[in-house]
Every structure is written in C-alpha cells, then in structure tokens.
Amino acid sequence: ALVLAGLTLVPLVAALVFGEARLAGSLAITVAVLVMLWLPGRHAPAPRRLQVNEALATVALTFVLAPLSMVLPFTGQGLNLEDAVFESVSAITTTGVSTISEVDDYSPALLLLRAWMQWYGGLGIAVFSLALALGHLAGARRLAGIYRQEDLHASTRTYARQVLSAYLVLTVVAVLILWWSLGDGLQALLHALAAVSTGGFSGYEQSLADMPSRLAPY
C-alpha cells in the first residue's frame, strides 16, 4: 500500500501541473486511503521464511489492490464503475485493452495516469516473476549464482534493483527517440511507458495509425 501511494504521487503531481484539480483531488484521496491501509501493519515483523502459498497470495493480492485503488480517479473523470475497473485492471496487468473510445475527450493527466499504471504494472510483473522463479526453481537460482536459501531475500532485492535500472534506461532511451521522432514530449512519454511495459495504451485516437513521425511522415 505504501509503495502504491508513492507511485500515485507521480500522476498526482502531473494532474496539478496540467491544472486538473478534480483528478488531483481523486488521486490525493487515493494516496490517503493507501497510507491508512499501510499504517496498521507498519510495525509488523517481516516473516523469516515465505511459504509458496503465501508468496502466490501476496502476488495475487497485489494485482487486486493496485487496480482497485485506482478506480476512483477514473470514475471521477466520467467513466462508469465497470469501465473504470476494466481500465484500471487493463493498465496494471499491461493488457492494453481500453474502454476509452475517444482519447481526445480526456485530459493529458488521465492519459498519463493510464500509461504510468501500465509502466509500473509491467515492472511489478517482472519483479514478482523473478522473485518466484528464484524462490522455487533450482535452475534459476543456480543461473543467478544463489546456492543457499538464506541468500534468496538479499539476492532477489539485488535483482529487483537491476530490473528497475534496466527498465529506467530503456524508458529514457525510448522517450528520447520518440520525442525526436514525434516532436511531442507528452506523446513520447505516453508511448515509451506503453512500449517498455508492453502495455499498449496510446495517446492517439487510432493508436499507431495516427502517429506522425519525422522518420515516416507519409
């Protein structure tokens, strides 16, 4: 919950920059609720050993809590509850299927929220998959140079940081290339976040069909 609250600060700041007071208010409420969920368990000791069923339940609950926590910002922008849940789940799971048919009718801050959600959703899938593979596949542990179960926690954290570093480098490179090609910083950011996470949300009405490019203007 605390990690999700921190991640939500990014679109919250973007909404304030774009002057989207209503969206910023919804995101602020979301952050407050997530912090309240975190407070009761902040002093709970971490388990020394995580069982297989506990690990799977943690991953599953994460991909339930994350999209549900983002439903309010979507409903506050005119989506009905069903569409808001669908949009949020699609973003977090990097599915890329959208219920928004006219993207031009929505604010840039909301489009950035969708792109940001699929970006960190893709990162979460990568890190969780790595953690589970290292925990339960002997071959994966040997390839990673982990020979003792006691090394798993520290090694998983190290590999998670490496995944994040690679993710950030790919994103920055994609933003710079698309910005140069499209001449639009916001669209470059939206499509870089979608591409690196393999999400699929686009800032154009017809997706790639509407994408202008200095490399392929026709």
Image (cartoon, rainbow, N blue to C red):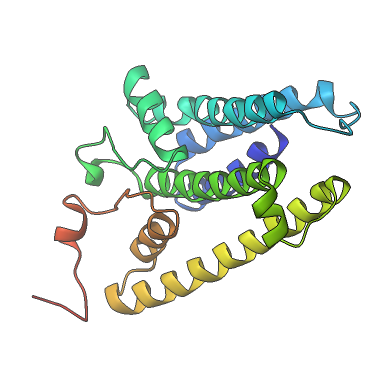
Q: Which picture quadrant has residue 61?
A: top right
Q: Is residue 36 above or below residue 191?
A: above
Is 93 positioned to the left or the right of 83 in the image?
Answer: right
Q: Which picture quadrant has residue 191?
A: bottom left
Q: Nearer the viewer, residue 161 or 153?
A: 153
Is residue 80 at least partly visible in the picture? no
Q: Is residue 190 above or below residue 58?
A: below
Q: Nearer the viewer, residue 87 or 104?
A: 87
How many numbered tags mark residues here? 0
**Residue 179 image position (x, y, % from top left):** 36, 74
Q: Is residue 95 above or below residue 177?
A: above
Is residue 45 at least partly visible in the picture? yes
Q: Is residue 47 above or below residue 179?
A: above
**Residue 145 image position (x, y, % from top left):** 76, 62
Instruction: Give the residue displayed 85% in from the left and 29% down from the top.
Output: 42
Instruction: Give the residue displayed 30% in from the left and 41% down from the top.
Output: 106
